[in-house]
Image (cartoon, rainbow, N blue to C red):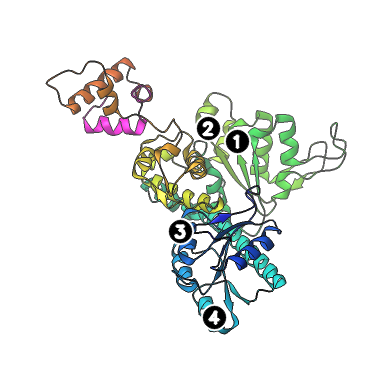
Amino acid sequence: MMRCSGPCTGNEDMPNSPKILVVDDDPAHLKMLKAVLSEQSYTISIAGDGASALAAVEKQFYDLILMDLRMPKLNGLEAQKRIKTISPDTPIIMMTAYASVDTAVEALKAGAADYLTKPIDIDELTILVRKALHHRQLELENKYLKERLRFDFAAFIGRSPAMRNLFETLALVAPSEATTLIYGESGTGKELVANAIHQHSPRRDHPFIKLNCAALPETLLESELFGHEKGAFTGATVRKAGRFHQADQGSILLDEIAEMAPATQAKILRVLQQKEFEPVGGGNTTKVDVRVIAATNKDLQAEMEAGRFREDLFYRLNVVTLNVPPLRERGEDIARLAEHFLKVYAEKNRRLIKGIGPHALDLLMRHDWPGNVRELENTIERAVILARGHMITAAELPKSIQHASVEERILQTETVPTGKTLKDMERDMILKTLEDSDGNRTRTAETLGISRRTLQLKLKEYGINR
């Protein structure tokens, strides 16, 4: 006899195969369904009643549930309603005797994907299961893409004053034809801002071409930008159109433009001034109508003053500037972004994770995020993969984020002076460390084992203006 009070699983050697939970109080029928579906490379778990099915869903994600309607303890209809509150997007196929078709229709109205009548036709079972899984996969992919797109054009804005200011400027800049220069540290989302400019411009229906100027050596960058004629250099066996030609009538993003060599800078200047260029190895002038968006994580004015960037090109690019704030300057957005990434990666990795624990969230809020939004995204993706329960805890965060607080460090010292409050001791420690670090706040924060943002808050709290 094959009876499971909890879920029994087969095909454990196929971790990437779709996971199906089969629920039926008839052991013989349960055994038959498991055998049939296992042959089709699905990972099968089984449960003998609705209550066991509910318990299984609380512990694990399933791609599909195949469930009998008439069962003891908890019937299929009631089990379906409760399962939908835990995993609303998991498709459920109901199984029922012919006489209970009306109940099956009721299940459909309550959200079931389909139903089968007993005795089960194996061919019909195979088709329905494959159809439900395929539909579910399409839904997941579509939802994931929508989430990414929604983030690309909206969620990066955030609610902090710095991001609201950026959004207000974007609304004015995007519809124009102005050359735009985007400043921001690595990982802040400069490319997302460029996407938003193009998508909200009159050129949105034309190409948006992107090129990272730091990714190619000077000898290849010019060819990539302006194209080349056949035989222009060794290996140029065919004529090739460059990125500016591809972007005609649209926009081009020149990312990390500060890394561009002076000779190539001169040719970019010509495109901006005269809307024309010559391919490498060619004498014919090509006219283009392209909006240029440039991005950099360096101070271009400082680069110009140091002689590494052309002055005339700087002023041509510096028509409209946008500054994308680092994450440490938009602390109000950290929790919102973390929850967004949690939702995206929990769904992508099929993990039932409900949220971020208070201690973990506090650590995220205290961290300086030198890698900005990209670092936060990677941190949450890692935490989702490593999570052992339904909540992200501090244990799933990188060691670099698990800072000891100043208070903890004070209590760990060997000599604790008497007659002083903890706050007095904390203030004294900060002052001494700041003095030892010659007033360098970054070094002070590192020595104390806290984020720079936390240090700034402490300095403000104690009225320290050094």
Residue 456 seen by the camera: yes
Amino acid type, callout 3: Ala
Amino acid type, callout 4: Val
Residue on which the image places disc 3:
55
Q: Quadrant of the C terminus?
A: top left
Residue 320 seen by the camera: no
- Mark 1–mark 3 contact, CB under 8 Å? no
Q: Is residue 209 left or right of residue 439?
A: right
* Nearer the camera: disc 4 or disc 3: 3
- In the rendered image, the vertical position of residue 311 relative to residue 26, given as above or below: above
Q: Quadrant of the N terminus?
A: bottom right
Q: Which label sits on residue 257?
A: 1
Q: Label 1, label 2: how many angstroms apart (C-alpha)? A: 9 Å
Q: Label 2, label 4: how many angstroms apart (C-alpha)? A: 67 Å
Residue on which the image places disc 2:
300
- In the rendered image, the vertical position of residue 341 relative to residue 228, given as above or below: below
- Of helix, strand and loop, which one carries label 1? helix
Residue 259 in percent (x, y) is at: 61, 31
